[in-house]
Every structure is written in structure tokens, then in C-alpha cells.
Image (cartoon, rainbow, N blue to C red):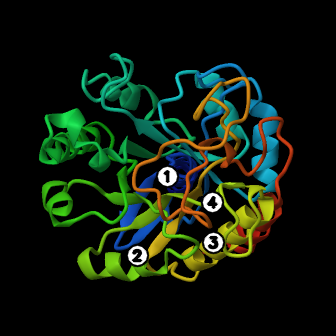
Amino acid sequence: MSKSIVYSFSFLLLLVFSCKVESNLNQVSVNGRTILLNDSPYVIKGICYHPVPIGSDLRDFENLSEDLTLMKEAGINTIRVYEPIKEEAVLDQMAAEGFKVIIGFGYNQDGVYDILSGSYLEYVEKYKSHEAILMWELGNEYNYHPQWFSDDIANWYSILNTSAKLIQEADSTHPVTTAHGELPDALALSMCSTIDVWGMNVYRWDNPEKIFKEWAAISNKPMYLSEAGGDSFMTSTKNGYEVGVNERAQSDANSNILESVFNNSDICSGVAMFSFTDGWWKAGNNTTQDAGGIAPNSTGVPYDGTPNEEYWGIVDIDRNKKKTFDVISKKYKSITQE
């Protein structure tokens, strides 16, 4: 065999190997307002996921296989969690089923992968090459809780900015986001320049339309709705929806919200609907499903202005589909990646 053939063959092998390595990098980046997965635009068709069994107040993945099957049926591609998933097997299963995960870090979680202790960076180092990871998310609506930061929200913004920078130094392959309560103000934007993607928990009745124009006027970065949706309980008869359990109200609200999100895909990178399953632990006795609950800045919850915290699932606690499940499935499956 001639030297030229050997060199050509070696080059070909190197090229094939390089392409294979590249395809497995799971590189997530941003370009303008767009989130990219391996250089292709990525649309978040997401769900907030914090499964807690009846009688407990702790997250438990005992129903993971069933839940992932239902999520696939609903056209979901992204799972947003409020605290790190410590069980690697759970991440493995999510990745194997084709899901990406937005990993949330809390500020003070008793030193377990939290921001206060700095142990969140240990988690980033451990899982930054995991196929499941889409983004790292710092905090959830902390701007509503200045009391956690010596009554000065600027303290949180300073911590947020520094924490994002440290993640970026440790991991250049995944963006850093935060779940901000509503539209960030000038202070948040000026103090948190390191944030790559802005998540926003938005409850503006059944129409978040205005927030996309408001965001476009103040930033060129990507954004997504880190929470949006309606619950399936009406505290009072209002707007044509009867008091009590009312899946039609939830279904109608979510249909309108999703329409608004994907009609503004030039600005918004998608949504994580709140939430996958009802949470009986949130508003009263955790062995029963109770109406009511407390959520900050939630008077925009459709259609009664009341956050019935235990009724927000697109499936109930036993994984029975609510009316909104089919609405979400139809919409998500109609949105294709470019």
C-alpha cells in the first residue's frame, strides 16, 4: 500500500472519529435570541417536574418510568426540576428516553448542591458531560423574597451573577439561566450580565403576549417561560367557569398560553408548563387534596386569580390525564425543531 493511500486512509479514520466525538458532545450554546443544541435551534417544549407521593413532602422518582412515558405522549422534550437530581440512574433514564433537563439550584439547601455552600459546583463538575443536561438554573423567583438576602434583593443579584460566572468557568458546554419572577427590571439586568438565558415565571391570566415585546425592548438574550399555566380548581364561579374542580378552565387557559408562546418564537425559546402532576403536599394535609395555597405575585392565575397549589398538574396524583393533557400534546407535537 502506498504512503499516499495510508495517509488518506488515516485522515479518513480521523475525520470519522472526530465527527463521532463531535456528535456526542451535547453542546448547548446561545446565538442571539436562540438556544442551540449541537448548532441546531432548540425549542423548549417543557414541563416542571417535582413528583411527591401522597402522604409525603419529599420528591420521589418511584413513578419515573410511567411519568416519562406520559411525557413522551405529551410531546414534551424538556424537564425542569427545582433541585438537582442526585440519582445518576434517573438522569440516565431521562437521557435514554430523549429528554433534556434544566437543573435548578437553590440558594440554601442545607449544603446539598446549593449555592450558599458552593457545592452546586461539585454537581456541575460531576454532570457537565451528561447527555441529559440542557441548562443550569440558579434560583426560582428569588426576586420575590428579598427577606432571604438581608432585605436587599441586590445581594441576591450579586450572588446570582457570581455563581453564573463560576459555572461558566467550570462548564463551557451548557448555558446558565435563572427562573425570575416576571420580567427582570433594570437592576436585575444590570447586575446579572453573566446570565445566558433568562427564564421567567409568568402568570398573566391566559395571555402572556405582552411580555415578549417587553423583553425584546430591553434585551437581546434568549428567554423562555420557566413557569406558566393554570390550575384545575375554581375558587369561585367566574368568567363562565363553575366553582370547584374545573379541568375545562385549566385546559382553555393552557391552550391560549401555548398559542401565545409559540406565536412569538422569534423572541421566546419555549415554555416549561407548570406542572406535570398535582402536588398534595403544598396547601394542607398531604394525604388529601386541598384547595388554596400561597404563591407570590399570583393574582394573574386564570381564571379566578387564585393559586390552588395542589391542582396544577396536567395529570392527577394517580397519573390520570386531565383535559389539558391532550391540549398540550397537540400543541407540542405541532412544533418541530428547525
Residue shown at the point (74%, 69%) measured from the top left: 241
Amino acid type at circle 1 is Tyr
| 18 left or right of 185 in image | right
Rendered position, 153 above or below 204: above
> How far apart are labels 1 and 4 at the CA level?
62 Å
> How far apart are labels 1 and 2 at the CA level?
57 Å
Instruction: Determine contact: label 1, label 4, CB under 8 Å.
Output: no
Amino acid type at circle 4 is Gly
- Between disc 1 and disc 2, whose residue precedes? 1
Residue shown at the point (13%, 55%) measured from the top left: 191
- Between disc 1 and disc 4, whose residue precedes? 1
Residue receiving disc 4: 230
Residue receiving disc 3: 258
> How far apart are labels 3 and 4 at the CA level?
11 Å
Secondary structure of the residue carrying tag 2 is helix
Quadrant occupied by the C terminus:
bottom right
User: Crowding at label 1, few (<14), some or many (≥20) Cα neighbours within 10 Å?
Assistant: few
In this rendering, which labeled residue sits more in front, label 1 or label 4? Answer: 4
Rendered position, 109 above or below 168: above
